């Protein structure tokens, strides 16, 4: 059943919602159920919000309508399949596709529990299966030259430029996930004999990561500009934006936007800069550089906050594959050595690597 209702903000009419039940359920799911009743972490809530946000944006384009005109009936298996296929066509992997699908399923499961009329919509969404991931795990990362080139792009003579450069340095220095960077507060920084930052990872788990001397120096300047007079015990977010005179946490969208802009400029001067730059790429890049400079995989795993040591194996595989490609590129097709160059000779043995991870080698 569809409804028409006017949404008001400060007495002014701002939109007409066609399906009140849908939008009321969305509100309660994100504002009440996830954070209060289920006790989900801010990161988890953001993941669900992102999935539904981009799905609803897709539905707008798919049907050629405004957001307030979307109804439950439009959120069906056909539109969901088209949405997921579009994600993959734009470069998202199967794991990302399945993550988005699980988040959307969670909302419909909640809706069906609250509103009996939503059960049919849940059944429709559940027609779309998770996709089997048969693709090999490929770790994308930047060269050190590319990292340097991008960091040089912000105009540090401006407040925004200085902020952006410091944030990029924090991304690389800490190898943190984007939500971990945006969650850092002043009180999470400790400047003892060994400066560290406390990061809040997945599942509410915390870990400490050391900070480089250059990062600490840049933070001291940053604090005088963006947190003048504030105590290091303050719970104010380090990175923020000012809206209507109030400081608010910076959004992931803002970060992704300026990263892309700086990368586009850097690519004109450094061909190493990849065509697509995103926050997690800094994490992969830092991990690969630490590993290639001799850091043991167990330490890399701790640095990244991986729950399982095996997760860190992807960096060993990626490094081995990179070396194999380099050797092949450097070997002439006429060389007798060419016949000995095959992928099987350079595959990392999982058993052997696991033994290294657990200290048996």
Image (spheres, helix red, strand yellow):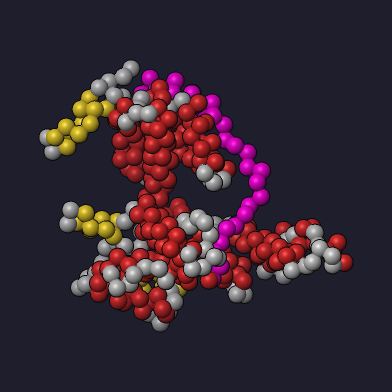
Q: Nearer the viewer, residue 145 or 212?
A: 145
Residue 359 picture quarter: bottom right
Would you place residue 45 above or below residue 205 in this image? above
Residue at position x 38%, y 19% in the image: 117
Q: Quadrant of the N terminus?
A: top left
Q: Nearer the viewer, residue 149 or 204?
A: 149
Q: Is residue 157 left or right of residue 41?
A: left
Q: Nearer the viewer, residue 249 or 350?
A: 249
Residue 114 picture quarter: top left
Residue 34 picture quarter: top left
Residue at position x 43%, y 57% in the image: 260
Q: Quadrant of the C terminus?
A: bottom right
Q: Is residue 249 left or right of residue 309?
A: left
Q: Main secondary structure of the magenta part?
A: loop
Q: Residue furthest top?
A: 1
Q: Position of residue 62 (x, y in %)?
A: 43, 30
Q: Is residue 202 left or right of residue 297?
A: left
Q: Residue furthest right?
A: 336
Residue at position x 32%, y 32% in the image: 67
Q: Is residue 41 visible?
A: no
- Magenta includes 327? no
- Magenta includes 119? yes
Q: Position of residue 347 (x, y in %)?
A: 75, 59
Q: Is residue 273 visible?
A: yes
Would you place residue 75 above or below residue 269 in this image? above
Q: Position of residue 12 (x, y in %)?
A: 14, 35
Q: Nearer the viewer, residue 64 or 19?
A: 64
Residue at position x 59%, y 37% in the image: 131
Q: Residue furthest left?
A: 11
Q: Is residue 202 left or right of residue 347?
A: left
Q: Position of residue 259 (x, y in %)?
A: 41, 59
The part of the chain drawn in magenta is 115-144
């Amino acid at each position: 059943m569809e409804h028409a209702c006017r949404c008001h903000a400060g007495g002014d009419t701002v939109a007409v919602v066609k399906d009140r039940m849908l939008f009321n359920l969305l509100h309660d799911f994100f504002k009440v159920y996830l954070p209060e009743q289920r006790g989900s972490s801010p990161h988890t809530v953001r993941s669900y919000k992102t999935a539904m946000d981009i799905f609803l944006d897709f539905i707008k384009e798919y049907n050629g309508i405004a957001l307030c005109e979307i109804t439950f009936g439009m959120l069906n298996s056909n539109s969901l399949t088209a949405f997921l296929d579009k994600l993959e066509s734009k470069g998202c992997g199967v794991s990302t596709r399945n993550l988005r699908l699980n988040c959307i399923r969670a909302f419909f499961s909640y809706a069906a529990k609250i509103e009996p009329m939503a059960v049919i919509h849940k059944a429709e969404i559940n027609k779309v299966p998770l996709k089997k991931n048969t693709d090999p795990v490929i770790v994308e990362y930047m060269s050190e030259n590319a990292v340097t080139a991008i960091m040089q792009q912000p105009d540090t003579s401006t407040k925004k430029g200085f902020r952006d450069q410091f944030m990029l340095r924090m991304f690389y220095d800490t190898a943190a996930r984007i939500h971990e960077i945006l969650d850092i507060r002043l009180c999470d920084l400790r400047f003892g004999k060994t400066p560290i930052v406390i990061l809040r990872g997945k599942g509410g788990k915390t870990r400490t990561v050391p900070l480089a001397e250059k990062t600490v120096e840049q933070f001291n300047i940053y604090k005088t500009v963006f947190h003048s007079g504030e105590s290091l015990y303050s719970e104010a977010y380090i990175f923020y934006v000012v809206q209507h005179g109030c400081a608010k946490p910076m959004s992931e969208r803002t970060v992704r936007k300026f990263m892309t802009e700086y990368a586009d400029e850097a690519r004109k001067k450094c061909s190493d800069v990849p065509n697509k730059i995103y926050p997690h790429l800094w994490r992969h890049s830092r991990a690969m550089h630490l590993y290639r400079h001799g850091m043991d995989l167990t330490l890399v795993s701790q640095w990244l906050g991986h729950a399982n040591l095996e997760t860190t194996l992807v960096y060993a595989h990626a490094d081995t594959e990179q070396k194999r490609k380099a050797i092949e590129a450097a070997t002439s097709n006429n060389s007798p050595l060419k016949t000995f160059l095959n992928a099987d000779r350079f595959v990392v043995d999982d058993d052997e690597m696991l033994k290294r991870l657990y200290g048996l080698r």
